[in-house]
Image: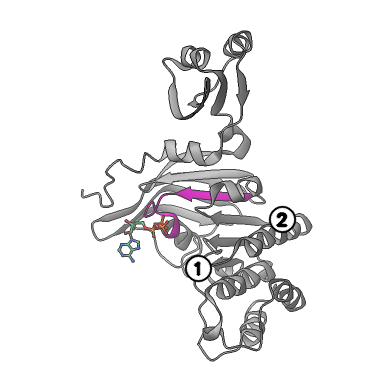
Amino acid sequence: MRITADNLTLRYGDTVALDALTVDLPAGSIYGLLGRNGSGKTSLLSLIAGHRRPTSGTLTVGGADPFENAAVMGGTAFVRDVVDATDAEPARAALRFAADLRPTFDLDYAHDLAGQFGLPLGKGVGGLSRGQKSALGVVLGLAARTPLTIFDEAYLGMDAPSRYLFYRLLLDDYVADPRTVILSTHLIEEVANLFEKVLVIDRGRLVAYDETDELRGRGVTVTGPAAAVDAFVAGRTVLGEQRLGGTRAATVYGRLDAADRARAADAGLDLGPVGLQDLFVHLTGSAAEPRAQEAHR
Ligand SMILES: Nc1ncnc2c1ncn2[C@@H]1O[C@H](COP(=O)(O)OP(=O)(O)OP(=O)(O)O)[C@@H](O)[C@H]1O
């Protein structure tokens, strides 16, 4: 489902969670939504899922206003880090309940997924471990087979093997049944290869929206003899560096043109890709920088 936001603004009292955000997300991609704590990710996803109404601006999902819109919400699975279910209800019943609720839900697939995650389906949901609860959420999200599937830091508590299983299952299922998937995460490098496009929001504003490879192309790692690297990066924005003996590796923000690349080659420098995490840190400010969580207007 295509998602378009135009000057989308959400306020909670004095707090501006989304600040005139304008973006167009065509259907049929896996989008990564990145942003620091409190940047507005969950707020944006809640609006898209129809759980909240914007303060101002417009938002359409599949061409319609999603707010409490049964048709849009029926085609949207929103997986958060907590599973809504009563404590005593067995996990198996949660799957059956989802199947009763959604015509698109694939119960056989859900059982297959639950088996792969080693979920004890007979156990009450409240008695599941944190990682198991997350796995249940992921199973519900994948098996929903909705045109729009949103995972809002859905991996919380999952150990590395379970997370990698989730990424593999998501990709397999996406290839078999392409749809729109939005994944918000803090584990950027871990999931970066999954994203076709990445949105970065900071303090409720869109600071980057690009194909993942394009975004990576905004920076470069320059490695070589320290003096040659120093000369090459002088006057550029250096995001980070490492030194080992006389060798220096500097991560630089900004694209290099053909002349830059030729100059680097002449100086015996190696050019390499930049991690998405480094770019993200640059685009959203350093951790030490004071950040206003609330913008008073
Ligand atoms: N129910 C609420 N009432 C008041 N303020 C809220 C509410 N929910 C979120 N906020 C505020 O809105 C801003 C955006 O919060 P949001 O939860 O969307 O961020 P996030 O990017 O999902 O953060 P995190 O990565 O920490 O989960 C924050 O300043 C937060 O304090």
Is 282 or 100 nearer to us in this picture?
Answer: 282
Magenta range is 30-42
Is 169 or 208 nearer to us in this picture?
Answer: 169
Q: Amino acid at mark 1?
A: Asp
Query: Label 1: which residue?
Result: 81
Tag of residue 114: none
Query: Label 2: which residue?
Result: 171
Q: Height in image: 1 above or below 218?
A: below
Inter-mark Cα distance, 2 to 1: 20 Å
Task: Tell me the quarter of the picture where residue 207 sits.
Answer: top left
Name the secondary structure under disc 2.
helix
Locate the N terminus by quadrant: bottom right
**Scheme of colours in the image:** one colour
Query: Viewed as shown, does residue 17 lie left or right of 252?
Result: left
| Tally of numbered tags | 2
Q: Amino acid at mark 2?
A: Leu
